[in-house]
């Protein structure tokens, strides 16, 4: 039994080529049944990219619930001028605009606006700290997507599918590049806060879908022990635990080879036991902020009691930086509400109150993260992506809120070979994208490109069909690449 | 079959933001209620199969799917021509056929990189037309 395992490993070692890389280029393994290919390779082994990468890792900041980028980045004087008037026909033609609560009168932002930095990017007074970082950021103001519900659009944002079952981008990245740290998950999820965000922040957005289960995201909890049941029980010695796991692995390998060859679920389970054992030491250390200086914590907004609303989110972002330092590939931070005063960014009513709370929570931590990454020389190789499932409408809802807007909104990306500046635009009132249009497929293609992966050639054979992260779509947004 | 009537604005061509023929300025009313959406759904699925065929270098499959796409787009071209549609719709349908043919040709010659590039152009072509003539499904 063990000799078979050894033989398999020897085969992989002696063949001396990147088996995984071949699977990425539509070569040998991609023409094999997926199960057979999975059995041949270590699914988390380091794999060569398609071309030289600009970035090594991604921190994906998902603003679950969908902020109004019209109140944060997309300044529209014309919307201010038209405040209170019905949505003009010239703007709404061809759009099915009644998504949730009908179409109210145009609703101007109440924020104060300024241009910032050398790039002159517009940022409202809701994000005073982030405004100081605009020269590191590429704002894509012509973003669009499909769907008008959080669940559907969150799925599309993360998996390129409108129904569950497709892999998240983090899973594709892990599949494409492997793990750069065998002692930590390559794809970590850091959910924060409370609220459901309309159901758009569930585990399906970090699922591995039809990719082997070993590529799924691993959710970390707040606190000293980031994963449930990671700690060794006091009544079990280290030697006992090691012996138990060795026996379990032997039995699983035996079953896998005898009854379930190529069973990705079983292989993933078996690997997870090994990884969990190693993570008993590595995971708590990775998220332990004890060795971080007071200055660093203050930078993120962790220790200032006056801004305690930032504590949980700031802690997650500082953990994200520590995970980046430990070569974790993809860190998916999901924002929730800091307290029960709001549910999430989903401001169908009381947008002023909602965005005050939510912006206060994320502004200083995100600005701190960018500054910290830059100071440590990590921003050059780390992509920081700020996005949501859609934006919000320029017309009002319930008197003081905004509805969902999949037709035009802002996403921004920093670091990892991205050129700062403002690209694309929405129309004069911010209803729909009119130039530099970037769909979620294009954002994904661009991120993969920066990681050295050609989204057209990162494929996986599933049910007889070659699948890719961006489905049949996706164009790299070349204008924002250095 | 979806029954829908949409109004197409000349300014939509600005929103498309991709290379392609521009619509004439002004409003064009176009009744698409007799458009056969089933053909488009079949083509959508065939496009996925075509992508897969190129990735797996399955020449036979690519040629078969390419012919299906050409046939579907020929129907669309005929439909838009009879409707007296703006030239862009007819032209996009013709260009799509040309690209599908080019994909088959490149694949048969063993040039899969060219096939993939032509496929990208075909996807852009599809999206450009859909952005104008297919209202967003919300």
Image (cartoon, rainbow, N blue to C red):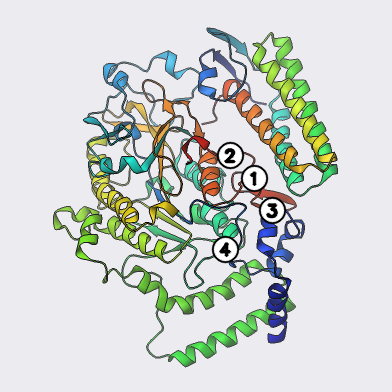
- The earlier-in-sequence mark between 3 and 1 is 3
- The earlier-in-sequence mark between 2 and 1 is 1
Taking the image as shown, residue B46 lies to the left or right of residue A301, namely right
Q: Residue at x 31, y 47 (%)?
A: A343
* Chain designation of label 3: A
Q: In this rendering, do the residues under marks 4 and 2 share a single chain?
A: yes
- The earlier-in-sequence mark between 3 and 2 is 3
- The earlier-in-sequence mark between 4 and 2 is 4
Taking the image as shown, residue A376 lies to the left or right of residue A257, namely left
Q: In this rendering, do the residues under marks 4 and 3 share a single chain?
A: yes
Residue on which disc 3 sits: A25
Q: CA distance from mark 4 to mark 2?
A: 22 Å
- Dot 4 falls on a residue whose secondary structure is loop
- Dot 1 falls on a residue whose secondary structure is loop
Q: Residue at x 57, y 37 (%)?
A: A475
Q: Examine the rendered structure and indicate whether residue A228 appears above or below residue A2.
A: above
Name the residue furthest left.
A306
Residue on which disc 1 sits: A456
Taking the image as shown, residue A90 lies to the left or right of residue A467, namely left
Residue on which disc 4 sits: A178
The answer to the question of whether label 2 and label 1 lie on touching residues, with beta carbons closer than 8 A, is yes
* Chain designation of label 2: A
């Amino acid at each position: 039994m063990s000799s078979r395992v050894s033989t398999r490993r020897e085969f992989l070692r002696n063949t001396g080529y990147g088996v995984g890389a071949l699977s990425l280029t539509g070569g040998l393994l991609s023409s094999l049944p997926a199960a057979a290919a999975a059995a041949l390779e270590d699914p988390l082994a380091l794999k060569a990219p398609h071309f030289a990468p600009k970035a090594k890792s991604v921190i994906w900041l998902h603003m679950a619930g969908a902020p109004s980028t019209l109140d944060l980045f997309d300044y529209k004087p014309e919307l201010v001028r038209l405040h209170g008037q019905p949505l003009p026909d010239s703007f709404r033609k061809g759009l099915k605009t009644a998504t949730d609560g009908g179409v109210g009168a145009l609703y101007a932002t109440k924020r104060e606006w300024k241009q910032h930095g050398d790039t002159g990017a517009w940022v409202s007074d809701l994000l005073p700290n982030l405004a100081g970082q605009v020269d590191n950021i590429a704002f894509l103001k012509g973003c669009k997507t499909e769907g008008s519900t959080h669940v559907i659009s969150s799925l599309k944002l993360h998996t390129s599918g409108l129904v569950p079952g497709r892999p998240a981008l983090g899973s594709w990245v892990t599949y494409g590049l492997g793990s750069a740290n065998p002692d930590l998950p390559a794809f970590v999820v850091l959910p924060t806060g409370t609220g459901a965000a309309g159901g758009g922040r569930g585990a399906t957005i970090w699922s591995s879908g039809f990719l082997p289960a070993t590529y799924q995201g691993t959710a970390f909890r707040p606190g000293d022990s980031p994963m449930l049941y990671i700690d060794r029980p006091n009544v079990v010695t280290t030697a006992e635990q090691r012996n138990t796991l060795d026996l379990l692995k032997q039995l699983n390998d035996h079953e896998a080879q005898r009854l379930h060859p190529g069973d990705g679920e079983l292989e993933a389970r078996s690997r997870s036991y090994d990884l969990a054992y190693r993570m008993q030491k590595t995971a708590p250390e990775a998220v332990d902020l004890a060795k971080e200086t007071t200055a660093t914590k203050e930078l993120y907004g962790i220790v200032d009691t006056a801004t305690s609303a930032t504590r949980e989110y700031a802690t997650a972002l500082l953990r994200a930086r520590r995970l980046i330092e430990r070569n974790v590939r993809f860190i998916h931070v999901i924002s929730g509400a800091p307290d029960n005063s709001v549910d999430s960014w989903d401001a169908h009513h009381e947008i002023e109150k909602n965005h005050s709370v939510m912006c206060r929570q994320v502004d200083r931590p995100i600005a701190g993260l960018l500054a910290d990454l830059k100071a440590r020389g990590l921003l050059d190789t780390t992509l920081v992506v700020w996005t949501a499932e859609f934006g919000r409408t320029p017309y009002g809802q319930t008197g003081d809120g905004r509805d969902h807007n999949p037709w035009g909104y802002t996403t921004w990306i920093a670091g990892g070979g991205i050129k700062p500046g403002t690209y694309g635009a929405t129309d004069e009132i911010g209803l729909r994208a009119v130039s530099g249009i970037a769909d979620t497929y294009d954002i994904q293609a661009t991120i993969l490109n920066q990681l050295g992966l050609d989204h057209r050639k990162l494929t996986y054979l599933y049910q007889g069909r070659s699948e890719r992260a961006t489905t049949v779509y996706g164009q790299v947004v070349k204008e924002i690449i250095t | 079959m979806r029954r829908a009537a949409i109004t197409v604005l000349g300014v939509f061509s600005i929103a498309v933001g991709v290379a392609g023929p521009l619509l004439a300025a002004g409003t064009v009313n176009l009744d698409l209620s007799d458009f056969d959406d089933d053909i488009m759904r079949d083509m959508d699925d065939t496009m996925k199969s075509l992508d897969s065929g190129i990735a797996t270098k399955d020449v036979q499959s690519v040629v078969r799917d390419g012919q299906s796409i050409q046939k579907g787009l020929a129907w669309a071209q005929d439909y838009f021509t009879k409707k007296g549609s703006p030239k862009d719709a007819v032209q996009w349908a013709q260009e799509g056929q040309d690209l599908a043919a080019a994909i088959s040709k490149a694949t048969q010659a063993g040039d899969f990189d060219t096939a993939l590039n032509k496929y990208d152009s075909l996807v852009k072509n599809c999206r450009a037309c859909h952005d104008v003539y297919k209202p967003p499904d919300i």
